[in-house]
Image (cartoon, grey):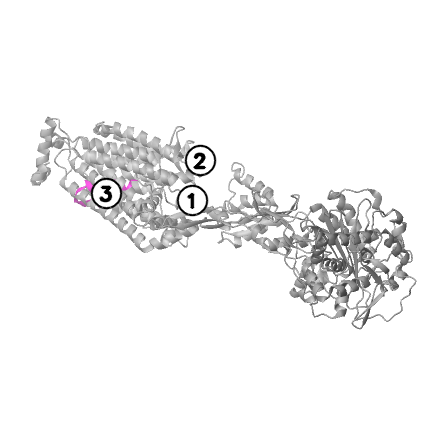
Amino acid sequence: MERERVERRERPERMERPEQRGRRKRNKTTRGGMDYSLLVVVIFLLGFGLVMLYSSSYYSASLKFNDPTWYLKKQIFATALGIIAMIFVTFIDYNVYKKLTWIIYGGSVLSIFMVLTPLGIEANGARRWVDLKVVSIQPAEIAKIGVIITMAAILSYNVRKIKGLMGIICVYMVTLIPTAIIFFVTDNFSSAIIVAAIGAIMLIVACKNNKGFIALIITLLGLAVVALLAFGGFRATRIMVWLNPEQYSSEGGFQVLQGLYAIGSGGLFGKGLGQSVQKLGFVPEAQNDMIFTIVCEELGLFGGIAVLLLFAFLIWRFMVVANNAPDLFGSLIVVGVMAHIAVQVILNVAVVTNTVPNTGVTLPFISYGGTSVVFLLMEMGLVLSVARRSVRGREV
Amino acid sequence: MDKTRGKKGPVKFTRGMTNRLVFVFSLVVIGLVVLCGRLIYLHKEYGDQYNIKVLEQQNYSNKVIPYKRGDIVDRNGVVLATSIKVYNLILDPKIMLSDEGKYLEPTLTALNACFGYDINELRQLVNENSKRSYYVYAKKLTYEQMEVFLDMQKDTDNYPNIQGVWFESEYERKYPFSSLACNVLGFTSSGNVGVWGIEEYYSSYLNGVDGREYGYVNNNNVMEAVKKPAENGNNIVSTIDFNVQTIVEKWIKYYTDYYKPENLGVVIMDPRNGEIIAMAGMNSYDLNNPRDLSSYYTAEQIAAMTDDDKLDALNKIWRNYCISDTFEPGSTAKPFTIASALEEGKIGSSIEFNCDGAEHVGGWNIKCHKKSGHGLISIQQALAFSCNDAMMQTAVAEGKDVFVDYQSRFGFGTKTRVDLPGEESCANLIKDEKMGDADLATNSFGQNFNTTMIQLAAGFSSVINGGYYYQPHVVKQIVNENGGVVETFDKNLVKQVVTGETCDIVKEGLKMCVESGTGTKAAIDGYTIAGKTGTAEKLPRGTEEYLLSFIGFAPYDNPEVVCYVVLDNPVVEGKQMTSHVLEVWTAIMNEVLPYLDIFKEVQEISPDAEPGDVDGSLFEDEYNDALNAGNGSTPQDEPDRQPPAPEPEPEPEENPDGDNSGGDSGGNNTEENNSEGNNTEGNNQ
């Protein structure tokens, strides 16, 4: 305790003042309120995502389902559900989750096992979906939010007690368990990486003396092991495809190449909204992982970079909210959400530009996927909820 | 912890955490910047290349939409030539083998079920061409065949995964009656290039303009798809009558088998407007398979042929005898000689010729076929009995200039400009003004100059229709695909050659020819038939090869149909006898006349009637005289002979023309005609 006090004292002035001001404001009940810039960006991304989703999916939807708005309708339904959830979560004090941590964690981890029940849907040799009759959901998305909340809670309690390598590993196990389950049960490599990365980033931010980087090293080591173990399997071919898509077109290079063609052919300002030709059967599943290629084709380099800038702005807002959070739990939740979105955006864009080997990662808010958008919006709700209670004046 | 919280409130985000968060954020920003760089790099480095790739992949970028070549129909709308949409089956092995080949087997099974193709062969083919996307596997499938497969492909519940099979449409030329009117119609090669006949002559009308589905890249590198529909070709309404043509070809085939002639041509036309109702030669071929020689040659012969030989053989078959082949017309030229002399006033209508059996011209003794001579005969009788002597006298009266002038007026030596390719003008086979006297004399009865069937038929029509020379034609009208008239080819009056009075006199002679002259066997019960026979000994003279012909018309008063039959060297006893060709002519006209709604007249002029019953003829007396003069018989024919082969032989007087006492006795004369010995002699005048 002494040492902490010393540390406290050593803090520069700047850090002290807001606390005092915050305390003053709390007395006057003048807390952070709604983070409108964050909200506007999210709503803009949602609207933009729906437009791009319709543009990229109407052709295949009319072919497959004889209804050009098939994907759009489902996504609008999910988005509406997600917005309701977001509003709900925004106005709930996030501290209640602290007490529900283990329920949330257990629930999200167990939900993954639902894919093994008869409710699970098998597609392309992997069981990643659960059919709840009314809707079908992807439990891996639930696991992400579960890991964020659990890691934030554990770290906020124990951050100062974490000692040594074993301490880090013990805390990181909270992330690694669902990671392993996702990887082995649903055979979903990309979701596993995202979950592991979320946990690692949270550890890096929370642990002092850069001990959190141990988690990153563990993640990378795990990745290397998986890569080595599976080198004979289909993931090895992905690497071959990555290095030389033209040569391995039938093994998946076709998809990669078509995406690249779409990006490259867009030009500076694109072919115009709705004018993509690559979505007409060339880029497979254009409304899913590959949607960014259609954005680049229709809106050009300009549109693609604008989208990346929007995400950059979103992530910057997360950083601000995390910095201004009234407590560590809130901060770490926001850091987790930030990690989630940052990792997914970077991975997705890296995959479609063939910067990294192909793996199925969706672009947040824009790609088609009901579960994803609902839980992303719930995460936004968490961030907004933290922002509402944030301490004014600490904004960077 | 509790203590801490108690003292300092909730655990806060420390400065270290902020720094590390800023660090993470910086990493994220760096990551995003790197990705932006990657996007810019792709754009800069591969933008154009990928753009081209994308445009290349657009399969609608350049697709021809074939037009439909127009139909050819007969005068009543019977379709003689049409284009049928057929479908080519295209395999796309690349697609079949995609997705781990899950499409391959279902697709092959479907192809087998619908078309009966061999699965193993298909599989091998697909695997050999795995990199290709376009392989034409089958051609010319009908819509019905294709439909079965398309239905199966659509039925994705029962037959999922049928992929990689396309159909491409094109048109195939079809001739529903295969060989019918083959010489008139012609055929097409490579679908739209007309070869011979109407197909060639009117090819530009029949052909349309291909449509095109294409894309182009506009200024913004955006693919614009444009579809320009095909313009289908126009339909051609022919003057040919399907039924008449069928009758003609039926009899041609029959008599070809019977007589085995070198050729047998028939032209039927309407003298009122020059429309050709039927036209056929002996050599016919299947228009749907025009390069098939098997009906003319044995397999060994074909195998022994070089390509040039084959082409020669084919050209012989494809040739339209009626317009391309020339021959000496023989006595069928006589009406022209008479008509021109009458028209120019060189002979009076009541002139009487004195036929003494021969004429001494230019050092030659040119004989009439009746060595004893026809005696004193009128113009009409001269035609009826086909008197060479009278013709020679007429020609002398005319003089060379008038004769040659009229030859060209009647169209000899010039193309009739019939709307068919390959017409022969025979200009160099006609004598000019500088010809010798013997030439003039022989030309007067149709020897020593050449003509084509169409020339003679067109000229003859003008002699019997009041003197109007109409351009012969086989196409009436060109209509577009919706039936709108594009162009009409009405009667095209080229010139008036002679006057009506002249025509009337010539016609009387022609009538008499059938009634009591050389052409009695052309008589058809119930009709007043008029016409002119012709027998020409072919070059070289003396080989006993004859070209027999008859050109006749009906009805007498207002001719509606002219039929010209040429029988080239029948292999038969008594080959010089026109009765052979008259048999062909009557066989055809017996069926054609009723079909063309030409009604029977009163029976009075029936050949069955007694000669004395023939009434109304101004020349009855002369006629009877002639009969008497001819030893009670009419001359059978007049195989003309040429001066260059002057006949030294004394003519047996007793039998110049033995047979045609049938003219008196009755119609059933086939037997009587063939008193061969007499005829042979008679022909050697």
Q: Which residues are magenta?
A: A195-213
Q: CA distance from mark 1 to mark 2?
A: 14 Å
- The three-letter amino acid code for the residue at tag 1 is Gly
Quadrant in which residue B532 is drawn:
bottom right
* Mark 3, secondary structure of its residue: helix
Q: Earlier in the sequence, mark 3 or mark 1?
A: 1
Among all residues in the image, which is located at the extreme right? B654
- Report the residue at 77% width, 69% height from top: B438
Q: Tell which tag, 3 or 1, sits nearer the viewer.
A: 1
Numbered circle sitting on residue A281 = 1
Residue A312, label in figure: 3
Q: Position of residue B616 (x, y in %)?
A: 83, 47
Callout 1: chain? A
For label 2, the crowd category at 10 Å Cα-Cα, with few meaning under 14, some 14 to 19 and many 20 or more, is few
Q: Is residue A310 left or right of residue B197?
A: left
Using the image, tell me which numbered label, if any, was put on residue B423.
Answer: none
State which mark lies toward you, 3 or 2.
2
Q: Horizontal placement of B589 versus B678: left or right? A: left
